Amino acid sequence: MSQLPRVQHEFDVCVIGGGMAGMIAAMASARHGAKTCLVHDRPVLGGNASSEVRMWICGPQKKNLKETGILEEIQLENYYRNPSLNYSIWDSVLYGKAFFEPNLTTFLNTTCNGAEMDGDRIASVTCWTLTSQTWQVISAKQFIDCSGDGILGGVTPALWRSGRESREEFNESIQPSQADDKTMGNSLLIQIRKTDSPQPFIPPTWAYKFTSPSDIPYRMSGVNGSNFWWIELGGLQDTIGDAEAIRDELMRAVYGIWDYIKNHAAEKEEAANWALEWIGSLPGKRENRRFVGDHILTQNDIREQRHFDDIVAYGGWPMDDHHPAGLLYPGQPTIFHGAPAPYAIPLRCLYSKNIPNMLFAGRNISATHIAFASTRVMATCAVGGQAVGTAAALWLGEKSNDIRALSTPANVRALQQRLLRDDAFLLDLRNEEPDDLARAATPSATSGENTAALAIDGVTRDLRASFGAWSSDSEHAWTSTALPASLALELPAAKPIREVHLTFDSGFERELILTPAHWHRQHSAPRGPQAKIVSHYRVKIDGKVVHEETGNFLRKRVHRLAAPVIGRVIEIECLATHDAPIARIFEVRCYA
Ligand SMILES: Cc1cc2nc3c(=O)[nH]c(=O)nc-3n(C[C@H](O)[C@H](O)[C@H](O)COP(=O)(O)OP(=O)(O)OC[C@H]3O[C@@H](n4cnc5c(N)ncnc54)[C@H](O)[C@@H]3O)c2cc1C
């Protein structure tokens, strides 16, 4: 009989899987007051973006569509604290976010591998902590599966599908004519570094031998630009059940590829001074279970930029459909089928059709294979995570915990408004919060007066022509002409003010990516705090400073005052940015 301890826990919300979707779901849930836990089976957070796998976080490719909210908060902190783009520091950024968030308990090295049902609901999950040899039995009101592989599909009756649908099933022109169970494969990545002297490489005896370009057609793009995502295998197998065997093949392939580059390829002279810095041991997984929700997102939803009343997230990456044979396929390893950006992702794709208290975010959402080929990128996973974490927490007070029943139009509108308050971007929606006192204010400014009203127009980014119903280019920030400069909002009458929210311009023209790919590491800029962000500012109410901030590096700031201050004029005095001659503020909100 087992003597191993079995610890019982009770949470409001239990999130499984600490990739970008799960981390952000858990943070959002905890920030909205739910007693939340995050169960993650690895020692470091971030999933495929972690130091163990090293994929870089992508989203819609248009820079003005950059994801904001919790994801950008994490990325801005990483660029601020980690200008050398070091993966250990990235680990520490994610660790800090998970372990120092009030209301959030994180279990690392802990695998969910069982569940107890209460009728059609999940009552608890059973998890195993490898390091402390402890069983954790976690009861919760809501469960959110962000495990990528969709573990709750394996241990509960939650409906899921995998593989490729037939073209006919959803009228999707990109799908194969016959449905099959093929998926995208798994990959091990390589990180390399240029040095000043020749760096020999002796391959292990067990590495595969690639000796001519015909062994890996269409795969090399020179050493400097190398990005090794195409070392991909397993799409013709079961990426869960065969995961260990696929890893073994990938180990042989990845060392064989580096041997080819160093010792056999036409690029070998160019590669002479390049050293191997790191090769992953944990393959990144792309595809397996996709849960079935009340709506299954399709190619046509994406291509038509379909409007959904219950939009809670968005995507915009092309439908990047890798060939299931991966490295074994002697043709282009992927086809980028165009997708308009942004397109909407509805809440109905993020909760289970048959388990009332189960939500999900990440690569396992309710989408067809070809729609998934776009939604799977991590920034899109992350904004979905923020949506479900917020929904789960926001609706806890309701009598029911049936997400479908809770998704009334009024509740969904409240969720959307809360997401916008938390700096999410939702196509076609703007701040309409009745509680926001600033919306009724009269704006003025010491410079850039003609743009002052833009700080309360409800839109927190500049828009470009392709943004859905917003069909014209427009700016949405108060923009000073010099520094220092002040923006003032005069309320119709004096009110007690408890909370002031500020949204600065973080400069979407730059990408905040962390990657092992050499070219990107060279060109990802600017590092450190972002130039346009207002670093030094004062918040004043009726001329009295209620908060002064120096060294700010974030876009969205929330200042909760120790006690309400009664006043009529809220002024934001901008004294300095990190490296821009003017200040820009997209939004000021005030709450009693
Ligand atoms: C090689 C490769 C290249 C890619 N290229 C890009 C790219 O350039 N940009 C991009 O944005 N996306 C890219 N993707 C896709 C992207 O990485 C995934 O779709 C994305 O990581 C999915 O996010 P997620 O949070 O759902 O899952 P994951 O990142 O897989 O995170 C889920 C986490 O849950 C944990 N977990 C799993 N089961 C359990 C369990 N039972 N209990 C507890 N924890 C569990 C896992 O260990 C994992 O860390 C790539 C993927 C691969 C594999």
Image (tube, grey):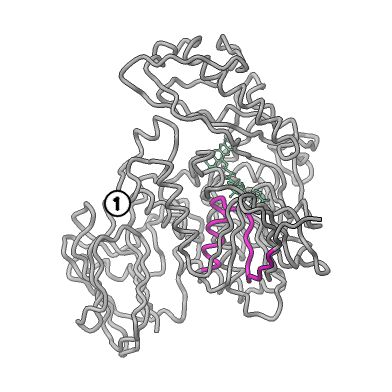
Q: Position of residue 349 (x, y in %)?
A: 67, 57
Q: Residue at x 66, y 22 (%)?
A: 329
Q: Is residue 180 left or right of residue 15?
A: right
- Residue type at numbered disc 1: Pro
Instruction: Please determine whether, in this image, residue 29 is positioned above or below residue 111.
Output: below
Label 1 CA crowd tier, 10 Å (few <14, some 14–19, many 20+): many
Between residue 488 and residue 99, name the one nearer to us: 99
State the image coordinates of residue 140 (x, y, percent, origin top left).
68, 69
**In-front residue for pair 13/183:** 13
Vertical arrangement, residue 340 with respect to residue 193, above or below? below
At a point 53% along the width and 51% down the height, the residue shown is 20
Q: Residue at x 59, y 11 (%)?
A: 214
- According to the picture, the residue beneath numbered tag 1 turns out to be 529
Image height check: is 417 above or below 164? below
Q: Secondary structure at mark 1?
A: loop
445 displayed left or right of 242: left
Where the C terminus falls, by quadrant? bottom left
**Residue 519, percent from left and from top:** 39, 30
Report ligand 1 position as a quadrant.
top right
Task: Work out whether residue 430 can be spotted.
Answer: no
In the image, which residues are magenta?
A: 7-30
Q: Is residue 552 visible?
A: yes
Q: Is mark 1 within 8 Å of ligand 1?
A: no
